Amino acid sequence: MPEHVLLSKIPEIRVLEEMAEMALSEHYPKIIDEEKIDVISRPEISITKIARNNPLGFKIRTSVLPEVKLPDYKAIAKKTLAAVPAEEKNVTVTDEDMENTIMDIRRSRAPKKHMSASEEKNEGEDEEKPPEESRHSTMSSSKPSGHSRTLLISGTS
């Protein structure tokens, strides 16, 4: 199709805009790679100059990853450890301390079950209790107002 026929059917600016869009979609990834830019969002592209037989002028605005500079964490750790007194560094943990900590964690993570007063009575009558030597369990309860009660049960076997 001859150029003058094309330009009579389609305005010249539309042809130039389409060509600019094609050029930018081809060259934008190359610009990012060449400049070693870590882009994290879609670009905002604005064409500043578009004319026949002239270079294309444009601006690209985009978000990039921030540059993070970490401090010398090894020096900070040495400084912090140097400030700790020697008696605090030499801590002895007994088996009893360890067992108490484990039980505290179990209590804090145990599932909670809400029971009515009648269910609580029936549960105590129907269940057989395991022998003490084979099962160690702890039970704590809190009685909120009303008929429900929260039981916290944890145990080891």
Image (tube, helix red, strand yellow):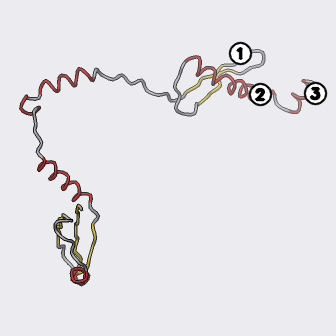
The amino acid at mark 2 is Ile
Q: Can you name the residue that lies furthest to the top here? A: 54
Q: In screen coordinates, is 9 left or right of 41?
A: right
Q: Which residue in the protein does label 2 denote?
A: 13
Name the residue beneath numbered marker 1: 55
Quarter of the rendering containing residue 81: top left
The label on residue 16 is none
Dot 1 and dot 2 residues touching (CB under 8 Å): no
Q: Is residue 93 above or below residue 6?
A: below
Sequence-earlier tag: 1 or 3 = 3
Q: Quadrant of the N terminus?
A: top right
Q: Position of residue 17 (x, y in %)?
A: 74, 28
* Disc marking residue 1: 3
Residue pictured at 54% horizontal, 33% vertical:
41
Residue 103's place in the image compared with 91, above or below, is: below
Check if mark 2's residue and mark 3's residue have beta carbons within 8 Å. no
Q: Amino acid at mark 3?
A: Met
Mark closest to the chain's N terminus, 1 or 2? 2
- Asked which secondary structure carries label 3, the reply is loop
- Where is 109 relative to 80, above or below? below
Q: Residue at image x 27%, y 66%? A: 112
- Residue 42 percent location from the top left of the image: 57, 33
Q: Amino acid at mark 1?
A: Pro
Q: Residue at x 61, y 20 (%)?
A: 31
Distance from the alpha carbon under mark 1 to that under mark 3: 25 Å
**Which of the two labelled residues, at mark 2 and mark 3, occupies the earlier sequence position?**
3
Q: Taking 85 as reference, is 137 left or right?
A: right
Q: Tell me the crowding category of disc 2: few under 14, some 14 to 19, or many 20 or more residues within 10 angstroms, Cα based.
A: few
In depth, the one of 71 and 40 nearer the eye is: 71
The CA span between labels 2 and 3 is 18 Å
Which is in the foreground here, disc 1 or disc 2? 1
The answer to which of 128 and 4 lies nearer the viewer is 128
